[in-house]
Image (tube, grey):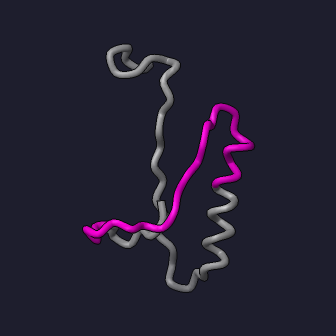
Amino acid sequence: MISPKVLSPNDPIQHIVCFKFKKHVGGDEIENLKESFIGLQNKIPGVISITGGQNNSPENLNKGFSHC
């Protein structure tokens, strides 16, 4: 159960998913996965939006995760 002090049952919840690809995975495969992942918003009731892209953090602390 969600604590009423933190969130109400009607508040949206944001999830962050990061991907680390093996070296042999090409750009076309990554693009296809991205399109499939974003397409989930039309298949899962309650999902308002899905956004993502390639890591662009200047800190370089991504530990190999290239996309979120």
Query: Which residues fall within the magenta stretch?
Result: 38-61
The residue closer to the viewer here, 1 or 63, is 63
Residue drawn where x is 67% and y is 44% of the image: 41
In the picture shown, does residue 43 fall above or below 26? Answer: above
The location of residue 4, given as percent across then percent down, is 38, 14
Residue drawn where x is 50% and y is 29% of the image: 12
- In the rendered structure, the answer to whether residue 1 lies left or right of residue 63 reads right
Residue 8: name its quadrant. Answer: top left
The location of residue 10, given as percent across then percent down, is 52, 19
The secondary structure that dominates the magenta segment is loop
In the picture shown, does residue 38 fall above or below 48? Answer: below
Across the whole image, how many numbered discs are drawn on residues?
0
- Residue 12 highlighted magenta (yes or no): no
The location of residue 67, given as percent across then percent down, is 48, 65
Residue 57: name its quadrant. Answer: bottom left
Given the current orientation, which residue lies at the most extreme right position?
43
The location of residue 37, given as percent across then percent down, is 64, 56
Residue drawn where x is 37% and y is 17% of the image: 3
Given the current orientation, which residue lies at the most extreme top position?
4
